[in-house]
Amino acid sequence: MASPKSTETARATHSLGTLPVTILAEPGAATFNGIVSKLREGYDILYLVCHGALIEDEPRLCLEDETGKAAIVPGVELVTRLSELKQRPRLVVLASCQSAGTGADGQSTDEGVLAALGPRLAQAGIPAVVAMQGSVTMRTIGTFMPTFFEELQKDGQIDRAMAVARGAVRDWEDWWMPVLYMCLKQGRIRWYTPGF
């Protein structure tokens, strides 16, 4: 049986399709400082898969420390560090990893923390943020994300890609969980060029 981490890595890689991918999944690599340091190299998309919780109405992310053990990071720290980057990601996708087993209907358990970070990241200058509003099933994520990125690569229109991806999961009870926070005038990601 595949580990949850390798399953999530495969899901994210599949979802991103032909886009170049850099994975920070090795023990000690997915630290808060490691992620921010890597982002300084300049990436258009940050696809962050992690557990989260709202503690005293503040979002907290469960990442890892240098030894591979759990490290709780205040969501406001992520917002602050991303806002300080010279070149911020054009798109941040916040997803919660599979935590209720490996079945197709397993649910994430981010308790809404990822959606709570969405508006803060948009306010900090991230042009588009996709986040989950609660316990979304892995079946929904497994269909939504590949559809979303496939559509996004067609024309860079993020709101259209979001609508098509939601349409792909419209018959499932958690179809409404993925939400888009956007501060783009024309709904197009700036890195998009015709023929991308």
Image: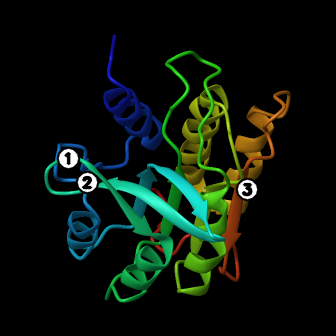
Residue at numbered disc 1:
68
In the displayed structure, does residue 131 sit left or right of residue 5?
A: right
Q: Is residue 68 left or right of residue 1?
A: left
Res 91 label:
none
Q: Mark 1 packing: few (<14 Cα in 10 Å), some, or many (20+)?
A: some
- Figure check: 173 above or below 71: above
Q: CA distance from mark 1 to mark 3?
A: 38 Å
Give the SS element for disc 3.
Answer: helix
| Residue plotted at (24% across, 50% down) | 24
Secondary structure at numbered mark 1? loop
Rendering coords of residue 1 (x, y %): 34, 10
Q: Residue at x 49, y 18 (%)?
A: 102
Occupied quadrant, residue 127 = bottom right
Question: Is label 2 in contact with label 1 (beta carbons under 8 Å)?
Answer: no
Which image quarter: residue 39?
bottom left
Residue 154 visible in the displayed image: yes
Most foreground residue, 186 or 74:
74
Image coordinates of residue 15 in percent, x first then y, are 48, 38
Quote the CA–CA distance across marks 3 and 2.
Answer: 31 Å
Can you identify the residue that label 2 sits on? 30
The three-letter amino acid code for the residue at tag 1 is Gly
Q: Residue 43 in the image: state x and y as whole percent.
A: 32, 67
Residue type marked 2: Ala
Q: Residue beneath label 3, please? A: 160
Q: Quadrant of residue 59?
A: bottom right
Horizontal arrangement in the rendering, residue 31 relative to residue 9 (left or right): left
Q: Is residue 188 visible?
A: no
Numbered disc in front, either 1 or 3: 1
